[in-house]
Amino acid sequence: MKTDFRELKVEMRQRIMAGVWPLGTMLPNEVDLAEEFDCARATVNRAMRELAEEGLVDRKRKAGTRVRKVPRRQVSFGVPLVRAEIENSGARYRYALLRSEVSVVPDWLRAKMNLPEGVNVRRVQAMHYADGLPYQYEDRWLNLEYLSEAEGASFADTPASEWLVSQAPFSDVEMSLSAQTADVDVARLLECDTGAALFRVERCVWQQGRPITFARLLYHQGFNLTTRY
Amino acid sequence: MKTDFRELKVEMRQRIMAGVWPLGTMLPNEVDLAEEFDCARATVNRAMRELAEEGLVDRKRKAGTRVRKVPRRQVSFGVPLVRAEIENSGARYRYALLRSEVSVVPDWLRAKMNLPEGVNVRRVQAMHYADGLPYQYEDRWLNLEYLSEAEGASFADTPASEWLVSQAPFSDVEMSLSAQTADVDVARLLECDTGAALFRVERCVWQQGRPITFARLLYHQGFNLTTRY
């Protein structure tokens, strides 16, 4: 049976890791590899393309494929809804709306999302609990210029994030990860000491170039986001 | 000219985003799409595969391809060496070793990385500066059972991370992002107030199943890791 691209990829990766194809050197060309592995040239091409996507090799249109000297590493995180994040961990999810009100956009948000003066926004503050314990405090702003349905919605029962997925499923997101200390109000909500270091996620979301929402998410003390790559 | 897979992908994505193919519905089959777009079935297949990788559609072997109800979002970060991270921002990089010494592995690390009792480790504490300002404090442990060359190396001039890339370029990493407060020593090194909230990255690294290093990286106050997706 002919070699498929997955088998070929495993074999090529092993040669790179074992130093048969040393760091920085050229790989054999596609025609030779196709002959060696008794497979189509397209199979070699696909295997090389995926190794390039993984950052192990560099492909140049004319020059061929080279083993990278320093592998380009990428780390990926899933971005699930907070409900799914909690339920996937086996815990029971609970949502509690703290406050939801419409106002004129504050200056800092206008600057951050490049909004026109005087536009109305809805601010939604809410808590997300895992098995009854504070998990995440959400402070979200919705741009009513484009999300006019949010003018009347209160988000008493449904988190704004879930409503947004149905309104704007395919959007551009700028995400920023950082740390901040808990002030008195946040410490009360997340049941931690004032001054505790909290993991913070901020998201600006655009749909088709239009700014639609900004959210600041503060996670409970001790939270960590873990992944393997 | 025949449609290539990139053009096809753009068109298919637009149909999904415009609701021509609504959330949760089946796409037309490959044969029909190949006919509509005057292209090979393999071209349709590749476009669908990439849309699936992006989390827009779900493919089932027999059942066909469906638009996802809730797009699966993934966010990716590059993981450059700290020198590249700093130099790519246009700043001047400086490395300063604080301390480098060999000892028997402490219990907490033995538990964390599943090391045998009594193995020797080298602990390397170092600072990374951007334009003369503290950027990152690194507290790293190297497992001398497998990194025997690190027995004699002092890391006075070369950061351990750069040395490791040459020793173990293709490795498995578990990365954990969180927040911690600065104690007196860390505050002095990162030139911030005691109690400041700091962004923390912890990495365990294995090569071919063997634990080789654990690093705790504390970033300067106000640091954030930003990406778009």
Image (spheres, coloured by chain):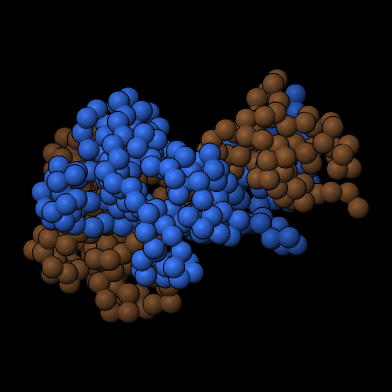
Chain colours: A brown, B blue
**Image quadrant where residue B195 sits:** bottom left
Whether residue B115 sits left or right of residue B222 in the image: it is: right
* Residue B125 can be seen in this image: yes
What percent of the width, then of the height, locates residue B192? 13, 45
What percent of the width, then of the height, locates residue B160? 41, 43
What percent of the width, then of the height, locates residue A51? 65, 41
- The foreground one among B1 and A183 is A183
Whether residue A125 sits left or right of residue B75 in the image: it is: left
- The foreground one among B180 and A204 is B180
Whether residue B141 sits left or right of residue B180 in the image: it is: right
At x 54% / y 35%, what residue is drawn? A70
Outermost top residue: A62
- The foreground one among A15 and A177 is A15
Whether residue B16 sits left or right of residue B60 in the image: it is: left
State whether residue B162 is above or below residue B209: above
At x 29% / y 26%, what residue is drawn? B91
**Image quadrant where residue A210 sits:** top left
Instruction: Give the tally of numbered discs.
Output: 0
At x 27% / y 66%, what residue is drawn? A222
* Residue A152 can be seen in this image: no
- The foreground one among B190 and B124 is B124
Outermost front residue: B152
At x 45% / y 71%, what residue is drawn? B117
